[in-house]
Amino acid sequence: MSVVRVLPFLRAGGGAQMALDDGLLDEAEAVVARRYTWAPPALSLGKFQKLERIPGLPFEVVRRPTGGRAVLHGEAFEWSFAVVFPQGALGEDHRGGVDTALPYDLVSRSFAAAFGEMGVVLDAGRETPYQRSALCFATALRHDLFARGEKVAAIAQARRGGRVLVHGSVLERRPPDELTQVAETLLDEPWQGEGLAAAGHIVDGEMLWRRVLARLDAGVRLLREGGRLRDERRDA
Protein backbone atom coordinates (compact mmCIF):
# COMPACT_ATOMS: atom_id res chain seq x y z
CA MET A 1 0.00 0.00 0.00
CA SER A 2 1.35 3.44 -0.95
CA VAL A 3 2.41 5.81 1.80
CA VAL A 4 1.54 8.71 -0.51
CA ARG A 5 -2.08 9.74 -0.83
CA VAL A 6 -2.75 10.58 -4.48
CA LEU A 7 -5.60 12.94 -5.31
CA PRO A 8 -7.56 12.64 -8.58
CA PHE A 9 -6.37 14.59 -11.61
CA LEU A 10 -8.07 17.98 -11.64
CA ARG A 11 -8.82 20.24 -14.59
CA ALA A 12 -9.86 23.64 -13.24
CA GLY A 13 -9.11 27.37 -13.23
CA GLY A 14 -6.13 28.95 -11.54
CA GLY A 15 -8.01 30.32 -8.55
CA ALA A 16 -9.40 26.91 -7.65
CA GLN A 17 -6.06 25.18 -8.18
CA MET A 18 -4.13 27.56 -5.95
CA ALA A 19 -6.85 27.44 -3.28
CA LEU A 20 -6.51 23.66 -3.18
CA ASP A 21 -2.70 23.78 -2.89
CA ASP A 22 -3.02 26.43 -0.19
CA GLY A 23 -5.55 24.31 1.70
CA LEU A 24 -3.30 21.26 1.57
CA LEU A 25 -0.46 23.33 2.99
CA ASP A 26 -2.74 24.25 5.91
CA GLU A 27 -4.38 20.90 6.57
CA ALA A 28 -2.63 17.83 5.08
CA GLU A 29 -1.98 15.12 7.68
CA ALA A 30 -0.26 12.68 5.29
CA VAL A 31 2.00 13.01 2.27
CA VAL A 32 -0.40 14.11 -0.46
CA ALA A 33 0.38 14.40 -4.18
CA ARG A 34 -1.69 15.65 -7.07
CA ARG A 35 -1.34 16.44 -10.79
CA TYR A 36 -3.48 19.11 -12.44
CA THR A 37 -4.02 21.30 -15.49
CA TRP A 38 -5.23 24.86 -15.77
CA ALA A 39 -8.38 25.48 -17.78
CA PRO A 40 -8.74 28.20 -18.86
CA PRO A 41 -5.06 29.26 -19.14
CA ALA A 42 -3.57 31.36 -16.35
CA LEU A 43 -0.48 33.29 -15.39
CA SER A 44 0.74 32.49 -11.88
CA LEU A 45 2.98 34.85 -9.94
CA GLY A 46 5.40 34.02 -7.17
CA LYS A 47 4.31 34.87 -3.63
CA PHE A 48 6.30 38.11 -3.54
CA GLN A 49 6.27 39.01 -7.23
CA LYS A 50 4.72 42.36 -8.13
CA LEU A 51 2.64 42.98 -11.24
CA GLU A 52 0.22 45.73 -12.11
CA ARG A 53 -3.11 44.12 -13.00
CA ILE A 54 -4.91 45.29 -16.12
CA PRO A 55 -8.38 44.30 -17.39
CA GLY A 56 -9.15 42.34 -20.54
CA LEU A 57 -6.34 39.77 -20.35
CA PRO A 58 -6.74 36.46 -22.22
CA PHE A 59 -5.85 34.55 -19.05
CA GLU A 60 -6.47 34.64 -15.31
CA VAL A 61 -3.69 36.01 -13.07
CA VAL A 62 -3.24 34.24 -9.73
CA ARG A 63 -0.66 34.16 -6.98
CA ARG A 64 1.10 30.98 -5.83
CA PRO A 65 1.81 30.18 -2.16
CA THR A 66 5.45 29.60 -3.18
CA GLY A 67 8.05 32.10 -4.33
CA GLY A 68 9.64 32.36 -7.73
CA ARG A 69 8.73 34.05 -10.97
CA ALA A 70 5.82 34.09 -13.41
CA VAL A 71 4.63 30.91 -15.15
CA LEU A 72 2.13 30.55 -17.98
CA HIS A 73 -0.16 27.56 -17.47
CA GLY A 74 -2.51 25.82 -19.88
CA GLU A 75 -3.51 22.25 -20.67
CA ALA A 76 -2.33 22.46 -24.29
CA PHE A 77 1.31 23.04 -23.33
CA GLU A 78 1.89 22.50 -19.58
CA TRP A 79 0.77 20.65 -16.46
CA SER A 80 1.38 21.20 -12.78
CA PHE A 81 1.86 19.13 -9.64
CA ALA A 82 1.90 19.52 -5.88
CA VAL A 83 3.26 17.36 -3.06
CA VAL A 84 2.63 18.25 0.60
CA PHE A 85 4.65 16.83 3.49
CA PRO A 86 3.34 17.16 7.05
CA GLN A 87 5.80 17.46 9.90
CA GLY A 88 7.66 14.19 10.52
CA ALA A 89 6.55 12.65 7.24
CA LEU A 90 10.11 11.75 6.30
CA GLY A 91 11.12 10.40 9.67
CA GLU A 92 11.88 12.09 12.95
CA ASP A 93 15.59 12.40 12.23
CA HIS A 94 14.87 14.36 9.06
CA ARG A 95 12.29 16.66 10.70
CA GLY A 96 10.18 16.24 7.53
CA GLY A 97 7.90 19.28 7.74
CA VAL A 98 10.52 21.58 9.29
CA ASP A 99 13.52 21.03 7.03
CA THR A 100 12.37 22.24 3.62
CA ALA A 101 15.48 21.02 1.81
CA LEU A 102 14.76 17.29 1.99
CA PRO A 103 11.17 17.31 0.62
CA TYR A 104 12.33 19.66 -2.12
CA ASP A 105 15.20 17.33 -2.98
CA LEU A 106 13.01 14.22 -2.90
CA VAL A 107 10.50 15.62 -5.39
CA SER A 108 13.23 16.87 -7.72
CA ARG A 109 15.02 13.52 -7.68
CA SER A 110 11.77 11.64 -8.21
CA PHE A 111 11.13 13.67 -11.34
CA ALA A 112 14.73 13.24 -12.51
CA ALA A 113 14.44 9.46 -12.17
CA ALA A 114 11.06 9.38 -13.92
CA PHE A 115 12.34 11.48 -16.82
CA GLY A 116 15.30 9.13 -17.16
CA GLU A 117 13.03 6.07 -17.24
CA MET A 118 11.17 7.67 -20.15
CA GLY A 119 14.30 8.38 -22.15
CA VAL A 120 14.79 12.05 -21.29
CA VAL A 121 18.47 12.70 -20.62
CA LEU A 122 18.74 15.58 -18.18
CA ASP A 123 21.54 18.10 -18.03
CA ALA A 124 23.76 17.85 -14.96
CA GLY A 125 24.68 20.74 -12.68
CA ARG A 126 22.54 23.48 -14.17
CA GLU A 127 22.44 25.81 -11.16
CA THR A 128 23.46 29.40 -11.95
CA PRO A 129 23.34 32.71 -10.05
CA TYR A 130 19.76 33.92 -9.79
CA GLN A 131 18.81 36.03 -12.79
CA ARG A 132 16.70 39.15 -12.48
CA SER A 133 14.03 37.76 -14.76
CA ALA A 134 10.28 38.03 -14.31
CA LEU A 135 9.87 34.62 -16.01
CA CYS A 136 10.29 31.34 -14.16
CA PHE A 137 11.46 29.42 -17.23
CA ALA A 138 14.20 31.99 -17.85
CA THR A 139 15.91 31.14 -14.54
CA ALA A 140 17.97 28.14 -13.45
CA LEU A 141 17.95 27.10 -9.80
CA ARG A 142 19.22 24.01 -8.00
CA HIS A 143 16.12 21.80 -8.14
CA ASP A 144 14.90 22.79 -11.61
CA LEU A 145 15.40 20.19 -14.34
CA PHE A 146 16.87 20.83 -17.79
CA ALA A 147 17.29 18.79 -20.96
CA ARG A 148 19.49 20.02 -23.82
CA GLY A 149 19.54 23.44 -22.23
CA GLU A 150 15.75 23.67 -22.01
CA LYS A 151 14.10 23.99 -18.63
CA VAL A 152 11.54 21.18 -18.58
CA ALA A 153 10.41 21.22 -14.93
CA ALA A 154 10.29 24.16 -12.53
CA ILE A 155 10.07 23.25 -8.85
CA ALA A 156 9.33 25.56 -5.90
CA GLN A 157 8.46 25.15 -2.22
CA ALA A 158 6.76 26.85 0.71
CA ARG A 159 6.58 26.10 4.44
CA ARG A 160 3.74 26.77 6.84
CA GLY A 161 2.86 25.38 10.25
CA GLY A 162 5.36 22.53 10.03
CA ARG A 163 4.20 21.42 6.56
CA VAL A 164 6.11 21.77 3.30
CA LEU A 165 4.47 22.25 -0.08
CA VAL A 166 6.58 21.36 -3.11
CA HIS A 167 4.89 22.20 -6.37
CA GLY A 168 5.84 23.08 -9.88
CA SER A 169 5.27 22.98 -13.60
CA VAL A 170 6.26 20.63 -16.44
CA LEU A 171 6.55 22.55 -19.71
CA GLU A 172 5.73 20.30 -22.66
CA ARG A 173 6.05 22.90 -25.41
CA ARG A 174 6.06 26.65 -26.02
CA PRO A 175 2.76 28.32 -25.10
CA PRO A 176 0.68 29.83 -27.94
CA ASP A 177 1.77 33.21 -29.25
CA GLU A 178 -1.50 34.84 -28.19
CA LEU A 179 -0.54 34.09 -24.58
CA THR A 180 3.21 34.71 -24.70
CA GLN A 181 2.77 38.05 -26.45
CA VAL A 182 0.50 39.33 -23.69
CA ALA A 183 2.85 37.96 -21.01
CA GLU A 184 5.76 39.75 -22.69
CA THR A 185 3.85 43.02 -22.58
CA LEU A 186 2.85 42.55 -18.94
CA LEU A 187 6.31 41.53 -17.76
CA ASP A 188 8.30 43.72 -20.16
CA GLU A 189 10.51 40.82 -21.14
CA PRO A 190 10.71 38.48 -24.17
CA TRP A 191 9.28 35.02 -23.55
CA GLN A 192 11.72 32.23 -22.78
CA GLY A 193 10.69 28.59 -22.44
CA GLU A 194 10.26 25.94 -25.12
CA GLY A 195 10.14 22.90 -22.84
CA LEU A 196 10.37 19.22 -23.67
CA ALA A 197 9.49 19.58 -27.34
CA ALA A 198 12.48 21.85 -27.98
CA ALA A 199 14.67 19.26 -26.23
CA GLY A 200 13.40 16.67 -28.70
CA HIS A 201 10.93 14.85 -26.45
CA ILE A 202 7.22 14.16 -26.42
CA VAL A 203 6.34 12.66 -23.05
CA ASP A 204 3.01 11.25 -21.87
CA GLY A 205 2.25 13.34 -18.78
CA GLU A 206 0.16 10.72 -17.01
CA MET A 207 2.80 8.02 -17.51
CA LEU A 208 5.52 10.36 -16.28
CA TRP A 209 3.44 11.20 -13.22
CA ARG A 210 2.88 7.53 -12.37
CA ARG A 211 6.63 6.98 -12.45
CA VAL A 212 7.19 10.05 -10.28
CA LEU A 213 4.70 8.71 -7.74
CA ALA A 214 6.44 5.34 -7.61
CA ARG A 215 9.79 7.02 -6.96
CA LEU A 216 8.24 9.38 -4.44
CA ASP A 217 6.65 6.52 -2.52
CA ALA A 218 9.94 4.60 -2.47
CA GLY A 219 11.82 7.70 -1.33
CA VAL A 220 9.45 8.40 1.56
CA ARG A 221 9.79 4.80 2.73
CA LEU A 222 13.58 4.94 2.46
CA LEU A 223 13.86 8.14 4.46
CA ARG A 224 11.51 6.87 7.16
CA GLU A 225 13.83 3.89 7.57
CA GLY A 226 16.84 6.16 7.95
CA GLY A 227 18.22 5.77 4.45
CA ARG A 228 19.65 8.40 2.13
CA LEU A 229 18.48 9.60 -1.28
CA ARG A 230 20.36 8.59 -4.41
CA ASP A 231 21.10 11.22 -7.04
CA GLU A 232 20.00 9.62 -10.31
CA ARG A 233 21.98 12.07 -12.43
CA ARG A 234 25.27 11.40 -10.63
CA ASP A 235 25.03 7.80 -9.43
CA ALA A 236 23.69 6.11 -12.55
Image: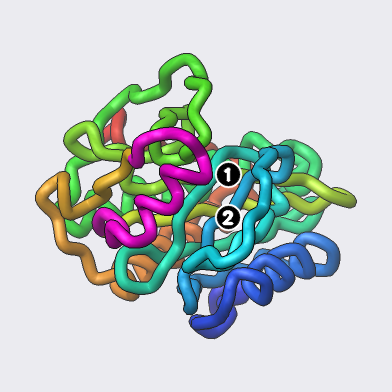
Residue 23's label in the rendered image is none
Give left or right: position of 233 versus 1. Answer: left
Residue to which mark 2 is pinned: 44
Is residue 92 something that shows in the picture?
Answer: no
In the image, residue 39 above or below residue 219? below
- The front one of 175 and 178 is 178
Residue to which mark 1 is pinned: 156
- Secondary structure under tag 1 reads strand
State yes or no: residue 225 in magenta: no
Give left or right: position of 189 versus 86. Answer: left
Who's the residue at 74% across and 37% down the image? 99
Who's the residue at 79% across and 69% down the image? 23
Across and down, in percent, residue 138 comes to 39, 33
Across and down, in percent, residue 59 comes to 51, 67
Is residue 157 something that shows in the picture?
Answer: yes
Who's the residue at 67% across and 66% down the image? 18
Magenta part of the protein: which range?
173-191
Who's the residue at 34% across and 55% down the image? 171
- The front one of 87 and 75 is 75
Single out the mark in the foreground, 1 or 2: 2
**Amino acid on which disc 1 is placed:** Ala
